[in-house]
Amino acid sequence: MKLKLAILAGVSLAVFAGGAARAQEDPRDALIRQLTARLDALESQVSDLKEATAADAADVRTIVATAPQVTLTNGRPTLATADGQLKFAVRGLVQFDAAQYNQENKLSPNDLANGTNFRRARLGVEGTVGKDWNYALTGEFGGSGSESAILNQGWVEYAGWKPWNTTQAQPLRLRIGAWATPANLEDATSNTEGLFLERPAAAELTRSIAGGDGRTGAGALVNGDAWYASAVWTGSVVGAASPAEFNEQSGYLLRAAWRPLQTPDYALHIGVNASGVTSVADTAAGPAVTQQLRLRERPELRVDGTRLVDTGAINASGLSQTGVELGGYFKNLYVAGETFDYKLDRTGAGKPDANFGGWYAQASWTLTKEQRLWVAANGGFRGVRPTKNFSPADGAWGAWEVAARYSYLDLNDREGTAGHALPTNGVRGGEQRITTVGLNWYPNQTVRFLLDYQWANVERLNNAGAKIGEDFQTISLRSQFSF
């Protein structure tokens, strides 16, 4: 009995072992194991691929984030790093003028020449280094018809000091080199955006005293959100050929402007300016010293470069000028005006100081509703920026503006009367009155055309007392592109 039980147990054990062995050797189980292994491998590869893709994407984002940014806004090529540390832009300007003069009451010997002239033809670069250091270098290849190519500006400035809270990106700029610091309200508007072909004679005369293009200097320009101030020591103009200077002029420019009122519809500007010559240039070679100053100006047009009002060279130890500015806009109406007083310190026993003056008033109406907005960086008004660029297919015609101005400049002092010789210590520089009306077209922000008509009256006596003034009209057209 025991033997039978032992045999049955052995057989059962063998049968069970055989069944287990057959179960382990089932092909389906092997296939499952192979598929599982392959899935594990694929998961590992996918995981590796995801990590590699994420790393590549991060590298691409890094490259894109640090790559130089190239833009071409309004035709101006600009290259900048993503962090703003470096910036480089090319600037260009061409102004081509054509004019015709109609001289009526011609008492002077001047024969004003009709024709054309490249008033300005500039090419330059500007940029930023280290985020807070700015620079500019521009050459001038145009002018008033007789100048050769000269340096228009070349300067470097530090703009990283922000001593107060303001929304302005660079509220304080410390600059040295050669440039044109705004000497008055009209000078604060770029010559690429001016209302007429030329600035008013009195404003242009003011900027020529110690400012103007290519004037060497060092100083500070500072502004907040609603105010502007500048103080600059200045020297001579780079490349000035006549008269030769053997000891350069020293002068100054001071200006403050404030915008007390502003809403989306209107703004008001109030400003004051002062400039002067503290050390008159020596124009004599050798041990002799000749210090003279001369005030003169053209009739607000440069196709013919003749200056019709001119004090002549006067022995002087200095010159001071003061001015008051007022301007504003209401919707698309713009108005502005300034007054200027000049005091020339004469040298020589018994020589009284000479006093001169001038003023202007101007206004414009933008037919297409654009505004001449106030800009804090220069303390003045910018030009018209068309809302819609010229595109006849879209029914868009750019921006259109009509304008008018009256200007007066008096360079007489103790001039006496007609028919009599020049009184002792008198100056007969003449009086100039100009009325101008204009029509301006802005197809876009790069191109513009200005059509002006002027009535000019010059009253002047020569030293003998004879009249050498004249009346004339001009029609002129400026074609401009700038970027």
Image (spheres, rainbow, N blue to C red):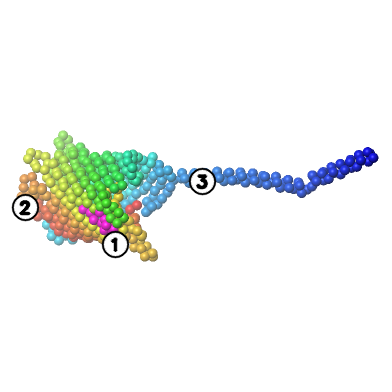
Pointers 1 and 2 in contact (C-beta within 8 Å): no
Magenta segment = 328-337
Q: Are marks 1 and 3 in contact (CB under 8 Å)?
A: no
Image coords of residue 10 (percent x, y): 89, 40
Which mark lies nearer to you, 2 or 3? 3
Q: CA distance from mark 1 to mark 2?
A: 46 Å
Question: Which image quarter: residue 450?
Answer: bottom left
Between 311 and 129, which is closer to the camera in this rendering?
A: 129
Front residue of 361/455: it is: 361
Q: Which residue is mark 2?
A: 417
Instruction: For marks 2 and 3, give the CA distance.
Output: 82 Å
Quarter holding residue 223: top left
Helix, strand or loop at label 2? It is: loop
Residue at 37 percent of width and 62 percent of height:
391
Q: Is residue 179 magenta?
A: no
* 398 displayed left or right of 247: right
> Which residue was labeled with disc 3?
60
For marks 1 and 3, the one nearer the N-term is 3
**Can residue 150 be seen by looking at this rendering?**
no
Mark 1: which amino acid? Leu
Residue extending furthest toward the top: 287
Q: CA distance from mark 1 to mark 3?
A: 49 Å
